[in-house]
Amino acid sequence: MVWGSGWFTVISLVQLLAPLVTATALVVIAVTFVRRARAAAPVDPTDRPGLMEQRLEHLDRLHAAGRITDDERSAARARLLGEF
């Protein structure tokens, strides 16, 4: 291919680069969607060892400090254990 001057060169470059730019854009879009889906996925307390115990201990500390009542502690424990 002989590179001329002017519009022919510009059009030729666009024709050569368009598929590459399009493919790159599609990859960026796909990666963005995957990352957002992972970030939005709910965390299962059983996925991380010790997480449930930490949450229950936190509730116990709040109760011991008088920051939550017996009923609030019981309700929160039931919610956490219901997720399990």
Image (cartoon, rainbow, N blue to C red):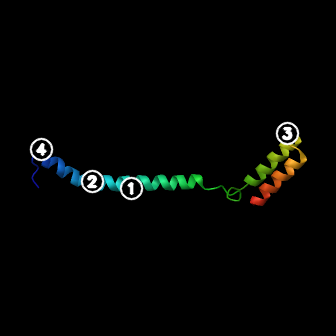
| Within-10-Å neighbours for mark 2: few <14, some 14–19, many 20+ | few
Q: Upstream in the sequence, badge 4 or badge 1? A: 4
Question: Can you tell which mark lies on residue 67?
Answer: 3
The amino acid at mark 1 is: Leu
- Please state which amino acid type lies under the numbered disc 2: Ala
Question: Crowding near pointer 4: few (<14 within 10 Å), some, many (20+)?
Answer: few
Q: Which residue is mark 2?
A: 18
Quadrant location of the N terminus? bottom left
Question: Which residue appears at 14% of the width and 48% of the height?
Answer: 9
Where residue 77 appears, as percent x and y from the top left, is 82, 53
Instruction: Locate residue 34 relative to residue 20 in the image: left or right.
Output: right
Q: Which residue is at the front of the view, 57 or 62?
A: 62
C-alpha distance separating marks 4 and 3 = 76 Å
Q: Which residue is mark 4?
A: 6
User: Secondary structure under badge 1?
Assistant: helix
Cβ atoms at labels 1 and 2 below 8 Å apart: no
Q: Pick whichever, 43 or 54, lies toward us.
A: 43
Mark 2 and mark 4 lie on one chain; the one further toward the N terminus is 4
Q: Pointer 1: what residue?
A: 26
SS for dot 3: loop
Kind of residue at disc 3: Arg
Q: Earlier in the sequence, mark 4 or mark 3?
A: 4
Secondary structure of the residue carrying numbered label 2: helix
Instruction: Kindly indicate the quadrant of the structure image that contains residue 82.
Output: bottom right
Q: Secondary structure at mark 4?
A: loop
Q: CA distance from mark 1 to mark 2?
A: 12 Å
Amino acid at pointer 4:
Gly
Give left or right: position of 23 versus 71. left
- x and y percentages locating residue 18 in the rendered image: 27, 53
Q: Quick check: marks 2 and 4 in contact, CB under 8 Å?
A: no
